[in-house]
Amino acid sequence: MNAHVRMILNGLFVVFLFLLLFSYAMFQGGFVSWFLFFGFIPIFCYQIGFLLHPIKNWKMTRKFSRSVVGAGESVSVTITIRRKLAFPLYYCICEEVIPSSLRKLDNKNDKYRYMDNPDKLTISRTLKKVIFPAFRQEFSFTYQLEHVPRGEHYLNAVRIRTGDFFGLVKKEHVFQLADVLVVYPNARPMVFKEQIISFEQGATTSSALQLNNTNVATGIREYMPGDRFSWIDWKQTARKNTVMTKEFEQEKSTDILLVLDGCSDEHLNDVTFEGMVEVTFSLMEHVKKQSTQIGLLTVGASTVYFPIHHDPLKSDMVRQHLTRMKPGGNQSFSLQMQRERMKIASGSVILIITSHIDNNFNEMAKKVNQRSKRVIVLLIQSPKEKSLNQHYIHQLQFEGIRIHVLSQQQLMKNPIEVKGK
């Protein structure tokens, strides 16, 4: 019902009660009748004042304890209400209008136990609080948002309900109050149980994504975070009066490109996709510590490419992109990668993060393998998909493509353990 119509009906109802009591006093007469009438006059004046009190003119502000948090963390939100007129109010029900993006839970590692049943992580958040303002011109309420999921969450409105002492008149107004809560994906520590990358045929393989050939030093450079203590060149450090480390041959030549499958698929659910994004971001952070150049290609509703080069701003851009990313697109990942493979620099190591493989995927992986130095597939797999993918896994292994399966149990561990197939 329209607010103006509701206010008119409430006003007519109050006036009707006033006229009813006045008529009763006139026709009945006597002390009791007139006592009831005059006793109702203060209530009538309050009801009229309450009807004319404009709650839509109230001012509101929303403040987050942190406007940027990590997935699965909690944030405290305080909403402050200010009004010019100190009109007495008995109660005020304040309700945050929760967007659909916040109707999911992210309880960090524990969410992966629901890879086959993601609906259990869907909840109905109801954030209401009853306040008794009385004569206060400024009052506030605070609530907690627990286990917030990854993404940009737009909180746009606050609903206020209030009424008089007797419940005869009620008012409601939705205040438009726009704020954004940014929830970044988590960078999880990763441990690689087996050799991951061989750079060249017959060359030394790299374990735990340690991408530097530490046998042949080709120069020196200043120390960078992530360098090993054993790489320090003590003679040059003493000569230059600053910490210098050895620069190795593979450090210059090894480039890595992460390819994230962001395409919609009937086999894909929200929890599995969160695992793919989390693994991608964790790999970006892990490889960056190795002083190795790394790029990112995401394929989905749109294709976004972050080239392979050292750029201080690239990390923030990648994190923001992965924060916003959702599965989409009308074409399969394999078909889109057929067009995008020309962006892949010859001789790069390609890591493909996906949740589903089939014949088309295997054909695409073979073509990418011909152009690159090495192709590695990280398969995020739910228990239901385990038996369906075994045939395609063997095909990839036969073609010399390394594949590593991350199951529900591995994603729940901290750090994430990657085992080869």
Image (cartoon, rainbow, N blue to C red):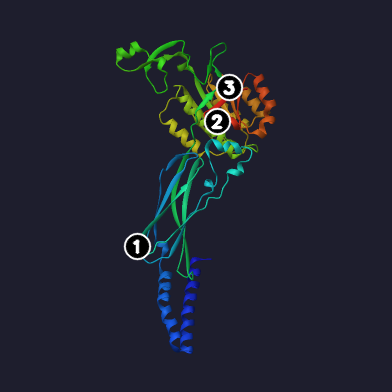
Q: Where, by quadrant of the figure, is residue 270 drawn?
A: top right
| First along the sequence among labels 1 and 3 | 1
Number of marks drawn = 3
Percent coordinates x, y for residue 207 in the rendering = 53, 18
The residue tagged 2 is: 413
The residue tagged 3 is: 375
Q: Are marks 1 and 2 in contact (CB under 8 Å)?
A: no
Residue beneath the point at 45% across and 17% down? 251
Judging depth in this view, the residue of 393 and 31 nearest the camera is 31
Q: Nearer the viewer, mark 1 or mark 2?
A: 2
- Please identify the quadrant where the C terminus is shown: top right
Q: Is residue 186 visible?
A: yes
Residue beneath the point at 42% across and 22% down? 226
Q: Amino acid at mark 2?
A: Lys
Instruction: Tell me the SS state at disc 3.
Output: strand
| First along the sequence among labels 1 and 2 | 1
Percent coordinates x, y for residue 398 in the rendering = 67, 19
Mark sitting on residue 76: none
Kindly report the distance in space between the C-alpha atoms of the residues bearing marks 1 and 2: 54 Å
Q: Nearer the viewer, mark 3 or mark 2?
A: 2
Q: Nearer the viewer, mark 1 or mark 3?
A: 1
The residue tagged 1 is: 84
